[in-house]
Image (tube, rainbow, N blue to C red):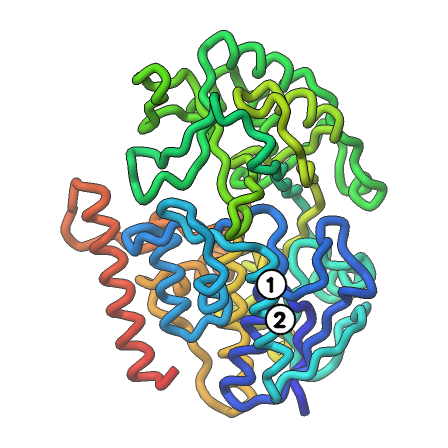
Amino acid sequence: MAVKVIGAGLAGCEAAWQLAKAGAEVRLYEMKPHKYSPAHKYPGFAELVCSNSLKAERIGSAAGMLKEEMRRLGSLVIECAMEAKVSAGGALAVDREAFSDAVTERIKNESLITVVDEEVTEIPEGNVIIATGPLTSEALAESIRGLCGEGLYFHDAAAPIVTYESLDKDKVFFASRYGRGEADYINCAFDRDEYLAFYNELINAESAPLKEFEKEHFSKDAFKVYEGCMPIEVLAKRGEDTMRFGPLKPVGITDPRTGKRPYAVVQLRAENAQGTLYNIVGFQTNLKFGEQKRVFSMIPGLENAEFMRYGVMHRNTYIDSPRLMTPYFNLRQREDLFFAGQITGVEGYIESSASGIMAGLNMARRIQGRQMCLLPETTMIGALSRYISDPTVEKFQPMGCNMGILPELPDRIRDKQLRYEKIADRGLEALDEYIRIQEV
């Protein structure tokens, strides 16, 4: 009997890939292209919406450590990301369409995976992995609520994309913060007066109304949003200098026109390998499209910017994993039902992908009658698995990879970079030993 995997996003594709690698037959259900969520547009699998960045590559970082763990576990996402990579300094960023196409091709060419183009509206019987992401369709969400109880909701926002040729080349300049990596980011430097004028317009700009399917879960006074994708206008309203200590921080940047550090800096990152499209880093937003054009055109160098996509905001859904789920990613009350991706409360592209790896790996081992895998707590995947399934957590919120969820080193190391490198080395050594002993 084939395992049913619902959703061909990052997590679903990873789960299906792990199952096929283990010799299991898979039926992968995807409602696109017949039906799209409010945030998705591209027909391919593993579509990236919020950003095209898979975060830092450096091993001595939480994201770099996580990606290396995924690579050692045979990650499809990491393999395809390396093929679709675009230059982004010290980060792994991809050409979105090339990345999606690569994942789609591999999944569709795998003989053990059958793709079913239809929407699933109820949780099926049998061995099932639900990887429908933060924008699970309402019908299936109702079915999940019937089994799991009322879900939790928050909002996620995506940043605008502009064309390179429309930028004012006399005002913008290429540089990476602190000179790390190649000068892959385009920088737009503010002086104090320019920044204050921009700030005042931003905090007074008009936001887009919530969609009908979101209104029932939201009111203006109960506005909740994941901190990692905070809309720029919401962040700005926290104080005049909040952006300058966040996505507009000028540290590590020198304006070649003045030889000095700017008052604030907006950075743009390449969206595709050709370098024709750039996204405005950290500018996730829910402003009306006309307001985005008006206010963001105040950024130096973007006065005549051509916006190829405006920022959008959408609902995210996740289950109460600490009360419902085991660290193996299956439900306590129904062991043949696994969840993967952001619906479990892991936050971020690579975190979602990693959860898909574990859900697929553990489903395969379960149907084979083998012991399921819980990676060592010193690994990033092991730490995330434990976090989202810890029943002692009182106020559960989505969690992305970070060094703070890992056990401390036995010896204190003051230098943060060296400390992180030691933590990553320890985790990767533990993972290699686990893979060897458990024959993962």
Quadrant housing the N terminus: bottom right
What number is the disc on residue 104? 2
Q: Which mark is residue 100?
A: 1
Quadrant assignment, res 175: top left
- In this picture, is 395 found above or below 31? above
Quadrant of the image occupied by residue 12? bottom right
C-alpha separation, residue under disc 1 versus residue under disc 2 = 6 Å
Q: Is residue 177 above or below residue 118?
A: above
Callout 2 environment at 10 Å: few (<14), some (14 to 19), or many (20+)? many
Give x and y (percent) for residue 203.
63, 18
User: In front here: 8 or 33?
Assistant: 33
Instruction: Say if mark 1 contacts mark 2, CB within 8 Å.
Output: yes
Given the current orientation, which residue lies at the most extreme right position? Answer: 212
Can you give x and y, in whole percent of width and height, for residue 253 in the image? Answer: 34, 27
Amino acid of disc 1: Ser
Evaluate whether residue 397 shows in this view: no
Q: Is residue 290 left or right of residue 392?
A: right
Q: Quadrant of the C terminus?
A: bottom left
Give the residue drawn at x 82%, y 42%.
216
User: Residue at coordinates 64% horizontally, 15% vertically from top-left?
Assistant: 201
Q: Amino acid at mark 2?
A: Thr
